[in-house]
Image (spheres, helix red, strand yellow):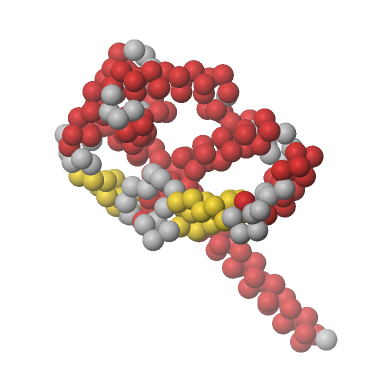
């Protein structure tokens, strides 16, 4: 029995050691992701370059930009600054570019869309939703609407999967409300922007700012 106890103790020590190394690795990755996010947020300090390398503790992240797109982004950015509509949190090259693309690079329409976004974030409390909102019913919700992120695609983008064929809307609404479910999705989008994209960018060593979505309709009638 003494030998058996010793073996169990050694196994327990080994597992604890493995857990400590795993948590340490996760913590280091999270720290790098946060640092990367900060680097991207202040990317406009690197002006006049079409190709920029962002260095995050021994990791180089390549960022290649189109000259015409960059010029349009700079014009939009200056107008938003003049109108006091651009906070430091949203002063990000790719965020501005995404809005420009959504309005076919029409500056005036993009500004209108941006202003609506800023007002909505204030009213909805989006800027603090990661800290203020807790979706305690998540585990139960996933039983009746399986969905979430799982790995990355070949380009390094996070993969989001929704199993629509296994969704049960009536049962889902007994557990949560539409308002809370919507707030949960807004929170997850914010988490993707501030945590997943930076982490994926570090892993891919290039700028990742989009996802791949898979809608699994197997079983959908």
Q: Where is residue 202 in the image (x, y as percent from the top left)?
A: 38, 52
In depth, the one of 153 and 108 nearer the eye is 108
Q: Position of residue 97 (x, y in %)?
A: 31, 33
In depth, the one of 58 and 81 nearer the eye is 81
Establish if 139 lies above or below 47. below
Using the rendered view, name the quadrant where residue 12 is placed: bottom right
Q: Is residue 139 visible?
A: no
Tell whether 9 sits left or right of 122.
Answer: right
Tell whether 162 sits left or right of 84.
Answer: right
Tally of numbered tags = 0
Q: Position of residue 3 (x, y in %)?
A: 76, 87
The quadrant in which the N terminus is found is bottom right
Tell whether 40 sits left or right of 48.
Answer: right
Question: In percent of the image, x 46 and y 40: which residue is there?
Answer: 193
Using the rendered view, name the quadrant where residue 219 is placed: bottom right
Residue situated furthest front in the rendering: 221
Question: In percent of the image, x 20 and y 40: which residue is there?
Answer: 66
Establish if 136 lies above or below 123. below
Q: Is residue 61 visible?
A: yes
Establish if 218 lies above or below 51. below
Question: In percent of the image, x 72 and y 48: which residue is there?
Answer: 168
Residue situated furthest top in the rendering: 83
In depth, the one of 40 and 85 nearer the eye is 85
Establish if 78 lies above or below 187. above
Question: In percent of the image, x 50 and y 58: which residue is there?
Answer: 151
């Amino acid at each position: 029995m003494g030998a058996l106890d010793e073996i169990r103790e050694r196994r327990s020590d080994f597992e604890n050691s493995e857990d400590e190394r795993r948590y340490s690795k996760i913590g280091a990755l999270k720290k790098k992701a946060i640092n990367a996010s900060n680097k991207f947020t202040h990317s406009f300090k690197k002006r006049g370059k079409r190709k920029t390398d962002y260095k995050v503790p021994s990791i180089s992240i390549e960022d290649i930009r189109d000259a015409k797109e960059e010029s349009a982004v700079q014009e939009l950015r200056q107008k938003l600054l003049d109108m006091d509509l651009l906070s430091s949190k949203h002063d990000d090259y790719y965020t501005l570019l995404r809005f420009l693309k959504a309005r076919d690079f029409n500056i005036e329409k993009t500004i209108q869309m941006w202003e609506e976004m800023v007002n909505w974030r204030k009213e909805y409390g989006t800027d603090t939703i990661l800290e203020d909102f807790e979706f305690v019913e998540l585990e139960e919700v996933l039983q009746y609407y399986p969905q979430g992120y799982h790995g990355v695609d070949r380009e390094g983008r996070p993969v989001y999967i929704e199993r629509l064929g296994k969704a049960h809307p009536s049962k889902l609404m007994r557990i949560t409300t539409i308002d809370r479910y919507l707030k949960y999705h807004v929170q997850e989008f914010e988490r993707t922007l501030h945590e997943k994209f930076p982490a994926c960018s570090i892993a891919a060593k290039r700028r990742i700012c989009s996802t791949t979505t898979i809608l699994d309709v197997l079983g959908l009638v």
